[in-house]
Image (cartoon, rainbow, N blue to C red):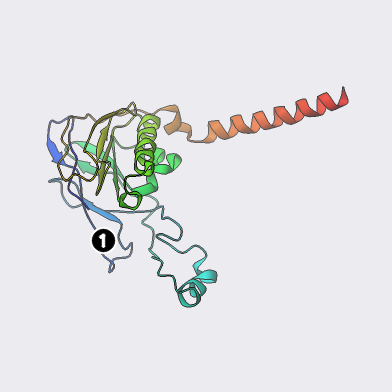
Amino acid sequence: MPRSAAGQSRSSARYTVIRGEATPRVPHDELRVVSIGSATTQRYGKHHLVPFGEMIPGKAVFGWFIRNVLAIPLADQTPGPAYQAPFEVAGERVAVNICYEDAFGGELARRAAESTLLINVTNDAWYGRSLAAEQHEQIAAMRALEAARPMLRATNTGITSIIDHRGVEIARLPWFTRGVLEGRIAGRTGATPYVRFGDAVAVIAAALLAVTTLLLGRLRTRL
């Protein structure tokens, strides 16, 4: 993983965001973050794997067919544990997420509850200079807003950025430019409604809307 993006914690200690490794010999393959800055070694293994990109869904049924008949060289990694403690770095508690794990707000919100910062490490080289990399940046910004936690992003081709707790990007590195992004950011505590309730409010509201629409439709047909 690239060494990139630096920040400032509440304890005023500057740190380099990320060092990672991929090691096929370990159980999680490992889309794995192994340390942040000068903190002691801490490990996070990616939990939410991408179907067909990082794991074979229904492997017991389809795995043999995919590997031997279609002969598609798909990765098949083992997910990290569902619960992994936040990293302890410079007085902050850091919730690490890898690649598109930041697309799943409910999962990240549960981890943000006991964290003060979010960090996303990703390989967006697949997208070149398309809008997909910008879209991923916007997804990360939404997660920061939902949890009211700053998000630091370290990417290999862009977009490496610092996003504040309001979901506002305050600094970034240019695409496809090697460099170090430095800035000041403070960890946050507390729980937003989304951190407390996740998607439950939206699901209940959608269910109520559906029931109301159904009842009104039946009422109109009777009239």
Q: Is residue 113 visible?
A: no
Find residue 104 and report its horizontal and vertical position in percent. Answer: 43, 43
Q: Foreground: 127 or 11?
A: 127
Image quadrant occupied by the C terminus: top right
Outermost front residue: 129
Rendered view: 143 above or below 66:
above
What residue sits right under mark 1 in the picture?
22
Quadrant of residue 141 within the rendered picture: top left
Find residue 120 and report its horizontal and vertical position in percent. Answer: 30, 44
The local crowd at label 1, few if under 14, some if 14 to 19, many if 20 or more residues have their Cα within 10 Å, is some
Outermost right residue: 222
Compared across the picture, whether 197 is left or right of 4 comes to right
Find residue 191 and report its horizontal and vertical position in percent. Answer: 38, 29
Outermost top residue: 223
Q: Residue at x 17, y 32 (%)?
A: 183
Rendered view: 220 above or below 117:
above
Amino acid type, label 1: Ala
Q: Is residue 163 visible?
A: yes
